[in-house]
């Protein structure tokens, strides 16, 4: 098949043959002088950091053109000389596509971007019959042309990526909807293998599928599989190899209309599928409970509280262990570099390494617990019910019900929550979700919130833990309420417009795939967030060390800056040290309280507060009152998003304006609430 592409779409290592040059005559002449004419083979060598310029090898020399010039040069993709093959995985969301991908590739995979989109996918490699196979897992989609970013990218990947065969994963429990995409893919490329997944579940529900008859009607192989059982995938690979080697399969006509494809899918099901009267009885019964009038909100709240409790309690020990390990490592390295100049060893070890280690020790354990739990809720089918239950509230705020999902993900990490906003079709509602995501506290803010709540408001005795849990729940509810209020204000002001449509699939409840869950949560979320956090934490940790060690007039720069900020801090019910800690904590929320402790103690490197008793004594000695603690809690809830989140907002919106708005919105809310609370308390006392 000769997929129409341009030279700009080639990735490093890919080859193509120039078929057409769409440029002015003078430019065509210049390109011809360089040997760039139709019929010439080119090989992409490398690309600039932003995708431009593109360097490629042509006629034995390497040339570079800007991406906009390359887009005017049409090419015919050529297979690589390695003898390997490329297979694409396609399918609707929630059909087990990623389970197939993980079963075939194991852990030999990596995430990446395609088509210049801000959409990530997975690519893995394995061998079959001695032939190296490159497998690309495309985002789940219902059609090749779609409004959402992920689904649109899936169609673009399928159309533009050179491949030998497409594996279309269908849901055997809902075959009609899945077959519509299979028909569209067959119209695009007949080098197709249709995999009817979840056959074990279909049989339990009384659904019978005649794969032989389906294959005859479609004109492509149809294989029954259960992705959890790897042995059922071998026939798929044999069929894909046969399809890839067939020379008689030519490029098909453009896909037919949507209604026609749906009619064809329905006809196929009437021919080859036997459906019982009530195939999803258990799912319907569970939905009556989870989405019922009286229990839906209490059950959702209880479920989320369990997730938060497991995250906070479970992260305590590994966080402490990692903190001690990094502290021991820093001590060991300081001894090993004792002969180095203090400014060098201190800056690198006490500054950059110790601060980065603190961020890792505080961030990694909660994320390693929260994200798998969140993925577990996704895989079982519970999260879509959350969006279903919350859509009424979101619609009143001129937002989308799917924002409930992105908001929930924000409790784990606001950067990941911003990324998840891609699931919202409407650009206006997607922007509302992006701009308000940082109004819910991420796991980086929970340790400081919990510490201050415990020592100032929970009191002592046996009931302190219960009181702390109730106060934390109140803070979370406050953040959710402010999020909805801010969404409503945005929806009626700078982002006013028509409310978008709400289309949400409620998949059947399924037993989760633990291995796939761990791979997705670790590779796609934990590593992604931790990598960005480390990149921003290291330089700021170094900056904090410099501020703490460079003295002017006998006092460190840290103390001088705190004094400058003291009047502003007083207006907010805080002090200059706390305000400076929030500013320096921009790269990572986790270091706000340690920076304040460092400034109070006058130490020369980032310092942990040790025990809660020691922290209470230290804060009280520096003038903290219940008002200070309350304002600290409010400003911790509503202050500037971390640098990782702001960077993610920019990558998602490609707009400095919206990135600045995402910064300004929570800061203005936090300042307003702190000033109002401070003024009210001071007037009453």
Image (spheres, rainbow, N blue to C red):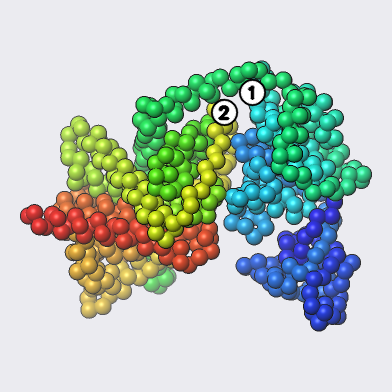
Q: Is residue 424 above or below residue 276?
A: below
Horizontally, residue 132 falls left or right of residue 423, namely right
The answer to which of 206 and 527 lies nearer the viewer is 206
Q: Is residue 340 above or below residue 430?
A: below
Q: Is residue 408 above or below residue 529?
A: above
Residue holding disc 1: 201
Number of residues whose C-alpha sits closer than 10 Å to that of mark 1, classed few (under 14), some (14–19) or many (20 or more) = some
Horizontally, residue 131 falls left or right of residue 411, namely right
Query: What residue is at 92 percent from the left and 45 percent from the top?
Result: 247
Number of residues whose C-alpha sits closer than 10 Å to that of mark 2, classed few (under 14), some (14–19) or many (20 or more) = many
Question: Marks 2 and 1: in contact by CB < 8 Å?
Answer: yes
Instruction: Please identify the residue farthest to the left as the structure is shown.
Output: 685
Query: What residue is at 22 percent from the left and 64 percent from the top?
Result: 569
Q: Which mark is residue 508?
A: 2
Which numbered disc flags the more N-terminal residue, 1 or 2?
Answer: 1
What is the distance, in whole Å, between disc 1 and disc 2 at their CAs?
10 Å
């Amino acid at each position: 098949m000769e997929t129409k592409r341009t030279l700009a779409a080639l990735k490093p290592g890919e080859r193509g043959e120039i078929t057409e040059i769409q440029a002015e005559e003078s430019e065509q002449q210049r390109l011809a002088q360089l040997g760039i004419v139709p019929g010439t083979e080119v090989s992409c060598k490398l690309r600039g950091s932003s995708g431009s310029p593109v360097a490629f090898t042509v006629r034995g020399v390497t040339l570079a053109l800007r991406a906009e010039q390359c887009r005017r040069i049409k090419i015919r993709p050529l297979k690589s000389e390695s003898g390997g093959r490329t297979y694409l995985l396609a399918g609707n969301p929630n059909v087990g596509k990623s389970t197939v991908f993980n079963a075939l590739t194991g852990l030999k995979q990596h995430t990446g971007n395609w088509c210049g989109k801000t959409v990530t996918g997975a690519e893995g490699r394995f061998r079959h019959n001695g032939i190296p196979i490159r497998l690309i897992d495309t985002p789940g989609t219902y059609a090749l042309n779609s409004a959402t970013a992920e689904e649109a990218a899936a169609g673009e990947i399928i159309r533009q990526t050179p491949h030998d065969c497409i594996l279309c994963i269908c849901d055997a429990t809902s075959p009609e909807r899945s077959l519509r995409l299979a028909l569209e893919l067959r119209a695009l490329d007949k080098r197709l293998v249709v995999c009817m997944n979840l056959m074990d579940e279909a049989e339990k529900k009384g659904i019978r599928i005649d794969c032989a008859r389906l294959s005859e009607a479609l004109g492509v192989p149809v294989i029954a599989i259960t992705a959890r059982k790897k042995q059922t995938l071998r026939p798929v690979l044999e069929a894909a190899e046969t399809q890839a080697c067939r020379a008689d399969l030519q490029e098909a006509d453009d896909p037919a209309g949507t209604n026609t494809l749906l009619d064809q899918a329905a006809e196929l099901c009437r021919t080859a599928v036997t459906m019982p009267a009530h195939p999803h009885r258990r799912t319907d019964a569970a939905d009556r409970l989870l989405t019922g009038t009286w229990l839906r909100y209490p059950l959702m709240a209880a479920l989320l509280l369990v997730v938060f409790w497991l995250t906070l309690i479970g992260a305590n020990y590994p966080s402490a262990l990692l903190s001690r390990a990094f502290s021991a490592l820093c001590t060991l390295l300081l001894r090993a570099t004792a002969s180095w100049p203090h400014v060098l060893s201190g800056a690198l070890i006490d500054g950059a390494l110790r601060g980065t280690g603190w961020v890792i020790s505080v961030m990694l354990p909660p994320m390693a617990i929260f994200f798998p739990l969140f993925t577990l809720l996704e895989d079982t089918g519970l999260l879509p019910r959350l969006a279903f239950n919350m859509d009424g509230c979101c619609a009143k705020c001129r937002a989308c019900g799917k924002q409930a999902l992105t908001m929930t993900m924000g409790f784990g990490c606001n950067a990941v929550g911003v990324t998840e906003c891609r699931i919202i079709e409407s650009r206006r509602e997607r922007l509302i979700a992006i701009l308000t995501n940082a109004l819910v506290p991420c796991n980086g803010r929970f340790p400081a919130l919990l510490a201050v709540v415990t020592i100032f408001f929970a009191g002592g005795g046996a009931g302190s833990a219960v009181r702390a849990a109730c106060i934390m729940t109140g803070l979370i509810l406050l953040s959710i309420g402010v999020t909805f209020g801010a969404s409503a204000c945005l929806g009626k002001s700078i982002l006013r417009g028509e409310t978008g449509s709400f289309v949400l699939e409620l998949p059947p409840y399924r037993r989760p795939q633990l291995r796939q869950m761990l791979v997705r949560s670790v590779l796609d979320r934990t590593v992604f967030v931790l990598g960005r956090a480390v990149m921003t934490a290291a330089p700021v940790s170094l900056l904090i060390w410099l501020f703490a060690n460079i003295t002017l007039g006998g006092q460190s720069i840290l103390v001088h800056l705190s004094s400058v900020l003291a009047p502003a801090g007083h207006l907010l019910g805080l002090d200059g040290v706390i305000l400076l800690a929030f500013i320096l904590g921009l790269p990572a929320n986790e270091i706000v309280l340690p920076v304040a402790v460092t400034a109070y103690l006058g130490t020369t490197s980032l310092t942990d507060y040790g025990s809660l008793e020691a922290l209470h004594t230290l804060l009280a000695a520096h003038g903290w009152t219940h008002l200070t603690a309350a304002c600290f809690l409010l400003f911790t809830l509503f202050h500037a998003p971390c640098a990782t989140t702001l960077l993610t907002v920019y990558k998602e919106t490609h707009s400095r304006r919206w990135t600045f708005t995402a910064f300004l919105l929570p800061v203005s809310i936090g300042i307003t609430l702190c000033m109002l609370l401070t003024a009210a308390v001071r007037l009453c006392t």
